[in-house]
Amino acid sequence: MELKKCVTVDETNNPLDEALSLINYGMELTFQGKFQEAEENANIAMRLAEKHNNHIIKIDALNLLGINTINQGFIEQSKDYFQQALNTALKENLTKIYTNC
């Protein structure tokens, strides 16, 4: 069964929930080998995260981009995405976000 999702963002709903949905769906697309669609989802999620100043979702989107590109064999490009995610976490002091779970 093939999953379909429209990448049009409905900002009447919580746009950050939409961003998380796009990231989750993007991960599914990556593992289905639909790399371009996964990248589009990640980029939309990234724009929403930046628009709403949500660094955690931005990091998730960057990690999706890293996973997506490494699955295509683009090691250097994936390292850049992962480094951006790490730099964002360090800059925003998000490195211990799950410590108290």
Image (cartoon, grey):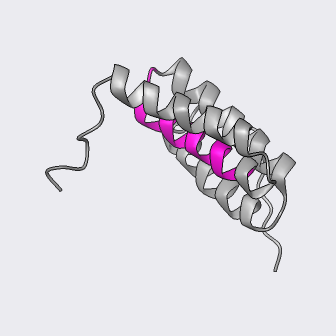
Give, as a single range, the part of the protein colored magenta. 53-68
- Examine the image and state in which quarter residue 63 appears: top right
Measuring 65% from the left and 52% from the top, which residue is drawn there? Answer: 67
Residue 11's spot in the image, x, y percent?
60, 31
Measuring 78% from the left and 40% from the top, which residue is drawn there? Answer: 40
- Rendered position, 31 above or below 15: below
Quarter of the image with the C terminus in it: bottom left
Residue 67 placement, left or right of 87: right
Residue 26's spot in the image, x, y percent?
69, 53
**Would residue 54 be seen by someone viewing this image from the given angle?**
no
Q: Residue furthest front?
A: 76
- Rendered position, 26 above or below 8: below
Of residue 72 and residue 11, the one placed in the foreground of this image is 72
Residue 48 placement, left or right of 95: right
Measuring 18% from the left and 49% from the top, which residue is drawn there? Answer: 99
Q: Is residue 61 magenta?
A: yes
- Examine the image and state in which quarter residue 24 appears: bottom right
- Rendered position, 47 above or below 95: above
Please tell me how many numbered marks the rendered image carries: 0
Residue 41 placement, left or right of 14: right
Quarter of the image with the N terminus in it: bottom right
Measuring 24% from the left and 49% from the top, which residue is drawn there? Answer: 98
- Rendered position, 46 above or below 50: below
Residue 80's spot in the image, x, y percent?
63, 32
- Examine the image and state in which quarter residue 12 appears: top right
Of residue 11 and residue 89, the one placed in the foreground of this image is 89
**Would residue 24 be seen by someone viewing this image from the given angle?**
yes
Q: Residue furthest bottom?
A: 1
Most frequent secondary structure within the magenta stretch: helix
Q: Is residue 11 magenta?
A: no
